[in-house]
Amino acid sequence: MIDISKKVLVVGIGGLGSIAAFDLAQCGIKTIGLMDPDNVELSNLHRQLLYTKDDIGYPKVIRAQKRLKNLFPSNNYIPYEMPMEESTFKNIAQNYDLIVDGLDRIEKKFTLNDMCVKLNIPYIHAGAVQLEGQVLPVFPGLSACLRCLFDAPTENYSAPSCQEIGVLGPAVQTIGWFQVFEIRKFLNQEKNFFLWKINLENRKIQASHLLKSSNCKICN
Ligand SMILES: [Zn+2]
């Protein structure tokens, strides 16, 4: 049974974050934080399902809060119209039981990974580019982390973002629903979590248990 008293913070309310926030709201999660510094743009609408053309030019977190409040009024939605930065993140994140990674750039995803592990807060990573992506639940101290998955990249590691090389709307949504599946398992107190790798072009979906990397500076 879903524990609706768990507090969940969604960081990045774009393609992935829209789906996660919607599902958390419809599950009846009472406290949902929404963090994003950006305004809605026309180019977002095909994959960021919380927004319509009337939202263009307005802050994503405010419009997402409004939409979710209309759909599921009994929950509390707390908007944080700000980028995820180390100086402010700790005080906010400590009020939550779970963090959801809805960020768009891999560098930011690593920063979120490092902060969640350091703060000992579970989080569910997801990422999508072009026609593929992955979902990884991270339980600090217990499971592998995002740096283990990418075999401990250096400080300068970067990869093309979905803005640069594109991402198909249905690919984001597919990966978003796999992320939701892992979020729901957390809310259900289940303990069996998987790394999902999804490649729509090759028609491959794989689930496995990721082991900690001995090179990972965060896990070691
Ligand atoms: Zn690690």
Image (cartoon, rainbow, N blue to C red):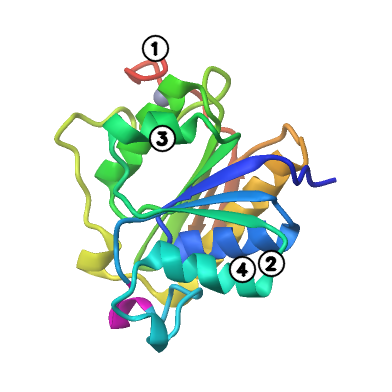
* Discs 4, 2 touching: Cβ within 8 Å: yes
Q: Earlier in the sequence, mark 4 or mark 1?
A: 4
Q: Which quadrant does ligand 1 occupy?
A: top left
* Discs 4, 1 touching: Cβ within 8 Å: no
Q: CA distance from mark 4 to mark 3?
A: 32 Å
Q: Secondary structure at mark 4?
A: helix
Which residue is under mark 2?
73
Residue at 59% over, 68% down:
68
Which residue is under mark 3?
146
Res 150 → quadrant: top left
Q: Where is residue 104? Give x, y as percent.
A: 33, 56
Q: Secondary structure at mark 3?
A: helix
Q: Where is residue 178? Give x, y as percent.
A: 60, 56
Q: Earlier in the sequence, mark 4 or mark 3?
A: 4
Q: Which residue sits furthest right?
A: 1
Q: Secondary structure at mark 1?
A: loop
| Disc 1 CB within 8 Å of nearest ligand 1 atom | yes
| Disc 4 CB within 8 Å of nearest ligand 1 atom | no
Q: Earlier in the sequence, mark 3 or mark 2?
A: 2
Viewer-nearest of labels 1 and 2? 2
* Amino acid identity at mark 3: Leu
* Amino acid identity at mark 2: Pro
The quadrant the C terminus occupies is: top left
Numbered circle sitting on residue 69? 4
Within-10-Å neighbours for mark 2: few <14, some 14–19, many 20+:
some
Q: Which residue sits furthest left?
A: 156
